[in-house]
């Protein structure tokens, strides 16, 4: 019997709605890079990760490090959808004393597995977790999402070398390849190309998929799970701001942008329609 | 004898014991300096739990944070400059901000880097790290204390930076004298009335030599060893300052950002006192053996004596 992807697609939609709700309530935020990872978040939280929202610190659980920490609201959107905390909390983004800060904080938000925000560090943390899981022999799977702009950080490649050296086949990394960063396109600023060849050269199994095709992402994650002896890099070809027309239209401007009440209404209409 | 051992061997013995524990939490990380720290044989003895990340210190700090988040207590080692300024942001964010329990061993503090010279001679590591919230900065006084301290470093929940001399440090304590050692407590090693010396690391022995020489002239100097510059045991230091009215700090670090700064901050708030300092003053490191370096950076016994005399003179003239 073939897998029914409809619930995962529905979760992706809910995550996008939650992202717009979360950032839109505040009126400004990193909406572009949150929307671009909504589908992979839906695959991870809706299908692949062995997690228990009622026990966010359960030992042996699968973990996600969102190394591009500014996509915190994207992760919160998924966590709220899974019931880690009430959805009303999404409206407290970046308010003083909130449990939902702009960048991921494991000590504030139930379900966030690692603090991130200073770019390049999260992948190393994920490598540490993957080594830890191997020592414990708990068969957990460790996932990390890195940004394409973030991949200009040298530490990403230090982490990549070690992951390969330690044969961390329990580690699956995603690149959110939306080709945009604050000051322009990745290609204009400091190109990563050939990105697939780079990760191959660093000893990873590399799979390139449409980052908005949940079926393709699931297929890639399944391949990663079957891969022995090497870590996997899944390059997600994505669109920054995906699913919200004003964000997509803003192109590099959607990294962090102001959102008006009218735009908020339009976005909800698009996503819920 | 404990006092004759290399300090790094005390670290290695401690690690071996902890790594041998079944289901123990300790793991050790190195960045291609396992042969320097003495951890190298442990890589073969405990291949899973001793991880050499290669020459990638920043990665080591964040990998350690990941291991900590997974329930382990990583001890990570590299030379002091790389264990502080090189991995500063990783210690700040992956370790401290994320509240991870990582122990950082920065070896060869200050002039003990000797022939590795200016690039490897950390006069700034304390200054670089001291403003990070909740990090503990510990500089062992000698071998006897270090052996007592390591289990407390492990037991403390949170990041600890250790300025570890690799060779045999000048002895200060007799064996057994540190049985009551408490990591965050400064210790009055020699009581005195005229002036107070607050010293750390290899400079405690120098301070004691200076106090002995001054005693021969009838000057009574109190010597306090301050193992943790953060948190600073200001209660002990302020009490002594109230008594003597003159304080000299003696450290193997830049006087800016290190022990002198920490002591001055506390005295400034609780007991403004005449101060003088011995330590590195606005200079980079350079190559040389210890006697040369002590002379080059004015860290000899005679420099401590001069500083005490200067403080005593000022004590009678300066009014707050």
Image: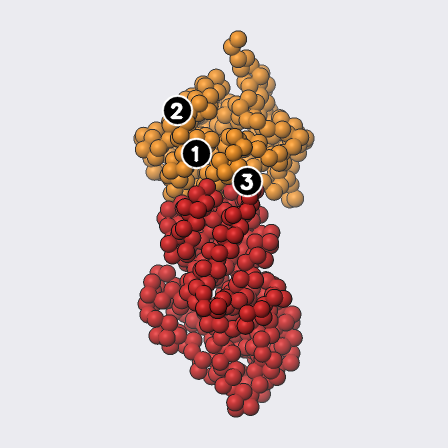
Chain colours: A orange, B red
Local packing at callout 1 (Cα closer than 10 Å; few below 14, some 14-19, many 20+) is many
User: Chain ID for label 2?
Assistant: A
Q: In the figure, B245 relative to B118: above or below? A: below
Q: In the figure, B132 relative to A50: above or below? A: below
User: Chain ID for label 3?
Assistant: B
User: Chain ID for label 1?
Assistant: A
In which quadrant of the rendered image does the C terminus of chain A lie? top right
Residue A5 falls left or right of residue B85: right
Label 3 sits on a secondary structure element that is: loop
Q: In the figure, A32 relative to B120: above or below? A: above
* Residue A57, numbered circle: none
Q: Position of residue A163 (x, y in %)?
A: 41, 37
* Residue A207, numbered circle: 2
Residue at horizontal 32 percent and vertical 33 percent from the top: A201
What residue sits right under mark 3 in the picture?
A: B70
Q: Residue furthest front?
A: B1
Q: Are marks 3 and 2 in contact (CB under 8 Å)?
A: no
Q: Residue furthest top?
A: A1
What residue sits right under mark 1 in the picture?
A: A168
User: Nearest the camera: B201 or A252?
Assistant: B201
Residue at horizontal 50 percent and vertical 77 percent from the top: B207
| Quadrant of the image occupied by residue B241 | bottom right
Residue at horizontal 57 percent and vertical 31 percent from the top: A61
């Amino acid at each position: 019997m073939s897998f029914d992807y409809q619930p995962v697609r529905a979760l992706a939609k809910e995550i996008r709605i939650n992202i717009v709700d979360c950032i839109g309530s505040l009126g400004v935020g990193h909406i572009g890079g949150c929307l671009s990872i909504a589908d992979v978040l839906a695959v991870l939280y809706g299908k692949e990760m062995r997690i228990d929202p009622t026990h966010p610190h359960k030992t042996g659980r699968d973990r996600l490090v969102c190394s591009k920490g500014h996509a915190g609201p994207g992760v919160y959107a998924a966590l709220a959808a899974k019931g880690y905390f009430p959805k009303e909390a999404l409206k407290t983004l970046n308010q003083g004393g909130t449990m939902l800060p702009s960048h991921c904080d494991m000590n504030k938000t139930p379900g966030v597995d690692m603090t991130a925000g200073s770019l390049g560090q999260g992948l190393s943390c994920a490598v540490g977790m993957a080594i830890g899981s191997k020592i414990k022999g708990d068969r957990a799977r460790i996932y990390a999402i890195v940004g394409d702009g973030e991949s200009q950080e040298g530490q990403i490649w230090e982490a990549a070398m070690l992951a390969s050296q330690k044969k961390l086949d329990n580690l699956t990394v995603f690149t959110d390849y939306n080709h945009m960063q604050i000051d322009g396109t990745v290609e204009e600023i400091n190109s990563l190309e050939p990105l697939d060849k780079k990760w191959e050269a660093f000893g990873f199994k590399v799979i390139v998929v449409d980052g908005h095709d949940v079926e393709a992402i699931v297929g890639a994650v399944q391949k990663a799970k079957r891969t022995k002896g090497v870590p996997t890099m899944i390059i997600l070809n994505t669109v920054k701001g995906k699913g919200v027309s004003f964000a997509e239209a803003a192109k590099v401007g959607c990294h962090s942008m102001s959102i008006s009440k009218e735009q908020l209404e339009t976005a909800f209409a698009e996503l819920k329609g | 004898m404990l006092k004759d051992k290399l300090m790094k061997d005390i670290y290695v013995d401690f690690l071996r014991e902890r790594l041998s524990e079944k289901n123990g939490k300790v793991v050790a990380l190195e960045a291609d300096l396992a042969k320097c720290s003495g951890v190298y044989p442990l890589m073969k003895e405990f291949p899973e739990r001793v991880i050499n990340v290669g020459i990638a210190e920043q990665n080591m700090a964040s990998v350690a944070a990941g291991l900590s988040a997974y329930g382990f207590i990583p001890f990570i080692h590299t030379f002091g400059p790389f264990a502080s300024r090189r991995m500063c942001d990783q210690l700040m964010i992956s370790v401290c901000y994320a509240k991870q329990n990582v122990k950082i061993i920065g070896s060869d503090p200050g002039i003990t880097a000797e022939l590795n010279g200016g690039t490897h001679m950390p006069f700034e590591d304390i200054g670089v790290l001291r403003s990070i919230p909740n990090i503990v900065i510990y500089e062992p006084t000698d071998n006897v204390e270090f052996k007592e301290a390591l289990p407390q470093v492990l037991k403390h929940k949170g990041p600890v930076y250790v300025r570890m001399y690799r060779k045999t440090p000048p002895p200060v304590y007799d064996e057994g004298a540190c049985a009551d050692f408490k990591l965050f407590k400064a210790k009055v090693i020699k009581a005195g009335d005229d002036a107070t010396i607050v010293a750390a690391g290899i400079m405690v022995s120098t301070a004691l030599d200076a106090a002995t020489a001054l005693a021969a002239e009838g000057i009574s100097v109190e010597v306090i060893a301050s193992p943790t510059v953060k948190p600073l045991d200001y209660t002990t230091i302020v009490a002594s300052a109230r008594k003597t009215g003159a304080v000299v700090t003696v450290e193997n670090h830049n006087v800016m950002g290190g022990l002198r700064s920490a002591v001055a901050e506390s005295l400034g708030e609780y007991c403004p006192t005449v101060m003088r300092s011995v330590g590195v003053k606005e200079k980079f490191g350079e190559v040389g053996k210890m006697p040369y370096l002590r002379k080059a950076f004015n860290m000899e016994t005679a420099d401590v004596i001069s500083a005490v005399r200067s403080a005593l003179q000022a004590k009678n003239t300066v009014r707050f």
